[in-house]
Amino acid sequence: MNTQGNTYTIVYASVMVILVAAGLSFAAIKLQPYQEKNIKIEKKQNILATVHIGTDAANQPNKEKYITELYQKHITESFIVDFNGNKLDGSAFDVEVTAEYRKNPEQRRYPVFVATLTDGQKRYILPLYGKGLWGPIWGYVALKEDFNTIEGVIFDHKSETPGLGAEIKTPEFQNQFVGKKIFNENNQLSSVRVIKNQNTQNNHHAVDAISGGTITSNGVDQMLLDYLKGYEKFIESQKHSSYEQ
């Protein structure tokens, strides 16, 4: 038995494993600031996209600069509210919606981003988070100044099935929400339901579900309802404030 040869092999393999692990750790540490910066740029881009701004970012020579300047120009206010609609201290942009989702709805912090369009009109952008078929789904919904009509939405996912649940990310699915209403004729929060096998074109409170993506569609439906309920008291306070002006 070649003991010396075996020892050499084991030592060599151990050293290589240590060196590779050290190299990967070093690379991860060096790349972390760039990864965090890219996450922030993507977040800003998604917030802007709900109000149809910055959608041509992929065609720009410097996407980071382009999105940053648009965000600074159009996101003119941001703040955090609680379940009762009261404003809280802290940075809305830094709120980790993933972590907040793990809390009871009454204990969550709810970020609000206010966009000012080129004509001076305001739009109120609210983050969303929920569960799809294979993992988390998330997004943003932008409301017009009446706090009822949807200006736009953005949805994304971690691991939904391509061609099925992953379709929540497509313009075809998201564009259905534009112009829909979240309050019914009795001024009760009804959200926008994602339903199938019905004609939703003239329904102000529903859109068509994804064919073959029932569970993910249900996830979007539940996510919208859950988070709009979380913002409901804030929305009601803003609507009453508008009526009094």
Image (cartoon, grey):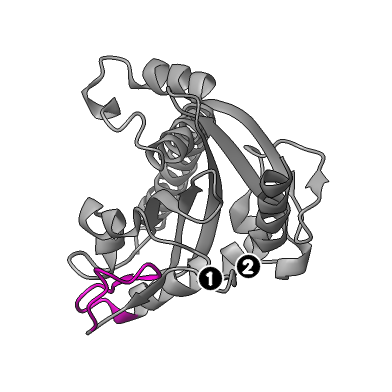
Q: Looking at the image, can residue 242 be seen?
A: yes
Residue 202: say if magenta.
Answer: yes
Secondary structure under the numbered disc 1 in the rendered image: helix
78 horizontally vs 162: left or right: right
The residue under the point 62% across, 37% down is 93
Residue 87, position as x, y percentages in the image: 79, 45
> What kind of residue is marked 1?
Leu
Q: Position of residue 232 (x, y in %)?
A: 66, 62
C-alpha distance separating marks 1 and 2: 6 Å
Asked where in the image residue 76 lies, by quadrant, the reply is: top right
Is residue 132 in view from this perspective?
no
Residue 225, numbered circle: 1
From the image, tell me which residue sits under label 2: 229
Whether residue 167 is in magenta: the answer is no
Question: Which residues lie in the magenta part?
Answer: 198-214
Q: Main secondary structure of the magenta part?
A: loop
Could you tell me if the residues under marks 1 and 2 are in contact, i.e. CB atoms within 8 Å?
yes
